[in-house]
Each structure stands twice: as C-alpha cells, then as structure tokens.
Amino acid sequence: MRLPSALAALLLLVALGACAARPPANDPEALAEFVETNDPLEPTNRAVYAVNGVLDAAVLRPVALAYRWVLPQPVRTGVRNVLGNLRAPTILANDLMQGEMQRAGITGARFLINSTLGLAGIFDVAEDHFGLRGHSEDFGQTLAVWGVAEGHYLYVPVLGPTNSRDLIGFAVDSVLSPWFWFGQGTAVEALRYSRVGLTVVDAREGVLDALDQIERSSLDPYAVLRSAYRQRRAAEIANSGVQAPQSAMGTGIGIGVPPARRDGPPSR
C-alpha cells in the first residue's frame, strides 16, 4: 500500500511545473472562469486523470464489477455499514472540533447502538429503529469551518478529486482514527489493510453506474467530475442536508461523485 502512495506523490511532484496559464486581465470572462474552477494545475491534473483512467479500467473497475457480481446487495450493504461504523470515532472527533454538539451526540449514539445491537455495524439499527440518521465529517471540513481556504483543486491517482486542504485533512484523519493506533502484529496489519482495500472497492462499486454514465454522456468527464466534487464538498461543509455516499477513504478525497442522498437535519 505504501508503494502506490509514494508513486502517486512522486508523479504529482514531478508534474507540478505544468500549470494552466492565467488569462490576462483584459479578458474578464476567461479570468472569472479560471478563478471559479480553481484549477491552476489543470494540465497536470488532466494527465493524472488520464493515467488514473488506465489504472481504473485495468484494475479498479473490474474488481468493483466482480465485487458487485459475487456479493448480493444485502451483503454489500452490510459491508458498507461496517466500514461506516468504523469511521464513527473519526466523525465524532470532527463533530466535536467543529462545535457540533448535537451531531456529535448522534454520531456517538449511532456508534454505540450499531456496534452492539447492529452486530458490529452490519445493520444500521440506529437509523432503522431509532431514527438517528448518519452523516460524514472529516478534518477537511473541520479546516473549512475554521476558515482555512480550500487551496488548489487536485486529482490524485486512485483516490481521485480533492484539493490541498482536503489532502491535509485526509492525512490528519488517518492519524485521528483509533484503528490507526490499535494493536500490532501481522494479524492486525492484515485487518488494517483489508479495511483499506474494502473501502476502496466499496467506494468504486458505489459509483459504477454514475461514472459510467458520465463517461458515456459527457464531452469532458474531467470537468464534470471537478464541478460535481466541488459542489458536493461545499454542501458537506455547509451541512446542507445533502450528502453523497462516502468517498474512497471517507474524506474529502473521492474516486467519484455518485448521486446524493439525504443526510441528517442541518445544524449549521
């Protein structure tokens, strides 16, 4: 798992010199579009997007299709529930750092209920029987609430669309998770990497139809994903009541932008 991450980081560092030219001030429409898209590294990002497309076609999409074919929907839902339940401590920490006490209470209650009555999170008893609807929160959102600007848009191999603020948030969330510190030994490491692998496969399976549709119908899938990602993140940061299914790592990094679903009641 470390080698692909190192290669991705190296690819980004090598390509940082490829930047989009900022339009001149005498072309206000082009300049406004340049600022709005917030993608000054667009040539680099598009190159990474193209490389990622080859990797996705060769590995991620076939694995996601096999995952969907082998496991029936109820089993896949159970896996997704377990993965979401494992993220609850990280979500709780970010709820608290944002001062969202009501949402923190819901997150804590969901974790306790689903970890016990829900059989380690396989069943979402908290929502189905207690009306406690879940939400996603991450350190990228926390930084946004604290007033940190999003930084430049980035496209990262495997993990997909993000920005510099959310990339930092992803790293912090990895360390915030108690499962990062829990246990040691070969068995624990195997479980930890299995969780990461399942999270990526589950996330890719969740956006199979949406991404296929974008590829079929869009003249510029890269631009569509960029726009959808930024809109989704703005909605999540505002706790607007709309949330897409969790991304690859449950943070502001996502391998795709699937259709939104309803979240819990907004508190901000």
Image (tube, rainbow, N blue to C red):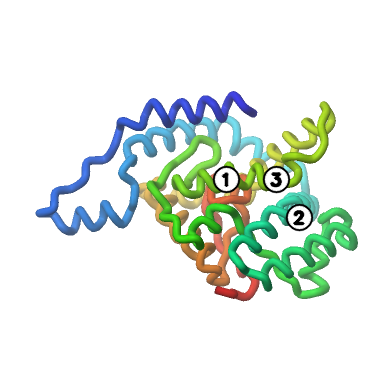
Q: Secondary structure at mark 3?
A: helix
Q: Residue at x 50, y 60 (%)?
A: 146
- The residue under label 1 is which amino acid type? Phe
Q: Position of residue 70 (x, y in %)?
A: 76, 42
**Would you place residue 61 above or below residue 121 in this image?**
above
Q: Earlier in the sequence, mark 2 or mark 1?
A: 2
**What residue would you read off at disc 3?**
68
Q: Position of residue 189 (x, y in %)?
A: 77, 31
- The residue under label 2 is which amino acid type? Asn
Q: Is residue 9 visible?
A: yes
Q: Position of residue 59 (x, y in %)?
A: 60, 31
Dot label at residue 216: none
How far apart marks 1 and 3 lie (CA) works out to 27 Å
Which numbered disc, 1 or 3, marks the residue closer to the eye? 1
User: Which one is nearer the viewer's eye here, 169 or 249?
Assistant: 169
Dot label at residue 170: 1
**Mark 2 crowdedness (10 Å alpha carbons): few <14, some 14-19, many ≥20:** many
Q: Position of residue 95 (x, y in %)?
A: 64, 63
* Left or right: residue 82 compared with residue 48: right
**What residue would you read off at disc 2?**
85
